[in-house]
Image (cartoon, rainbow, N blue to C red):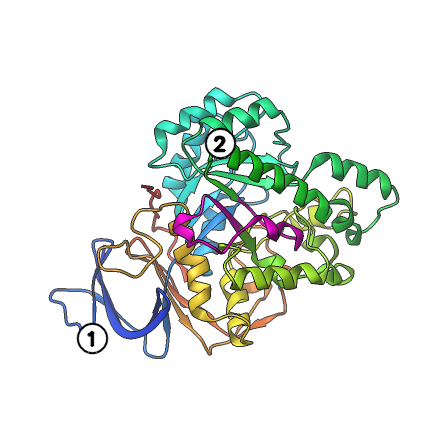
Amino acid sequence: MIPILIKNATIINEGAQTHADVFIKNGYIEQIGSDLNPSGNYREINAEGKWLIPGIIDDQVHFREPGLTHKATIASEAMAAVAGGITSFMEMPNTNPPATTQELLEEKYQRAAATSVANYSFFMGVANDNVEEVLRTNEKKKDVCGIKIFMGSSTGNMLVDNYVTLNKVFSETELLIATHCEDERIIKANKEKYPDADNASYHPLIRSAEACFESSFSAVQLAKQHDTRLHILHISTAKELQLFTNMFPLKDKRITSEVCVHHLHFTADDYPQLGTLIQCNPAIKSPENKEALWEALLDDRLDIIATDHAPHTWEEKQQPYGKAPSGLPLVQHSLQMMLHYVKTGRISIEKVVEKMCHAPAQCFNINKRGYIREGYWADLVLIAPNEKYRVEKSNILYQCGWSPLEGITFPATVTHTIVSGNLVFEDGKVHEEKRGLRLEFH
């Protein structure tokens, strides 16, 4: 591992901008200061005019391995992630087979250790009939990010609707529970209400705001009853926001929330143009929901920005509504999407760093990541804030080979990504031979 000296960077970290050098050695940030001149051999990167931010931590991705590798692999999507400034990911259990045993969970870790250029962690999956297996994860709370419960059906058919199961997991787990919240009974009734639904514009009517709220409300009630550490994923509606607070700092919250970039960017008005390409669960909804999500993000009722990266092949997404799977690929472009909103003045770059870097590290108690601090792991991203980047098929790294953002020009470019001290991405090229590390929690 060659030491790296980053010179003359504008460091954006912990709500402030400073101009300094950063020296990286043995995987860690060894020194931050002005006019650093370390001894020995090292690689120097000139960061004049560039922003240096902590590596992004994406707490919700679907990398499709094992069993769904015609869509994506851990290797392919991790490369797309680092190209977009994501240095660490937490992956969901709805693979084939699903990660619902300790052995299957550990196999995913072993696969990532062999193939992932990014740092990684994997959620343990809950089914209606594996409670004791799930609770064994309590012994691994230092090296497993959490437990995932699908309180609404989505890709992988891992719906958990047995109240006895839910109650036991919420009452006995020592780990964070992350939930997908959509009420299955409401969705079923909505499908009957719209029997002729033949295009994606029906998706937010079937997977409605009410379905999201009722399920999220149930999860919050269970968490409050048992004082469980609950994190609700991909909030998509204005109504759900009443379930969250900004009265306490993140470190004191027992119930936290996440918003995804596509719910901040698209609305139901985009279905006529993009159709099933932006079909996802929970659905992208009417514009007033997007506006409410932005307001809650900025006032800290919403804690984390993530992607819910969920690739499918182009052929799968071209099927008619009702057959096309839900989900869209996003890890390569989530930071650029948010930098677009920095450029338009909707959010500050300091707030983006807070929500994509600091907050995930704090929310999940990740050890020595998410900040630019001496003694922390060197997970770092250099951004050219005025160098435009156009999304085209030629530069898309997702295995599925497409993006709903194709043809869009973003105002900034990720030029370098450093993962655990290794330079894994520079000037458009991923160093595929590098490997990330398993995240640790405290």
x, y percentage for residue 100?
A: 51, 27
**Residue 247 shown in magenta:** yes
* Left or right for 265, reference 302: right
Q: How many marks?
A: 2
Give the amino acid at mark 1.
Ser
Q: Residue at x 20, y 53 (%)?
A: 26
Give the residue at the far left of this rendering: 39
Q: Earlier in the sequence, mark 2 or mark 1?
A: 1
The segment highlighted magenta reads: 232-257
Residue 23: horizontal and vertical position, in percent? 22, 65
Looking at the image, which residue is at 54% across and 30% down?
Answer: 98
**SS label for mark 1:** loop
Look at the image and tell me in which quarter the C terminus lies.
top left
Q: In this orientation, which residue lies closer to the viewer: 153 or 23?
A: 153
* Residue hosting label 1: 34
- Secondary structure of the residue carrying tag 2 is helix
The amino acid at mark 2 is His
- From the image, tell me which residue sits under label 2: 226
Q: Residue 427: which disc?
A: none
The percent position of residue 342, horizontal first and vertical second, equals 51, 72
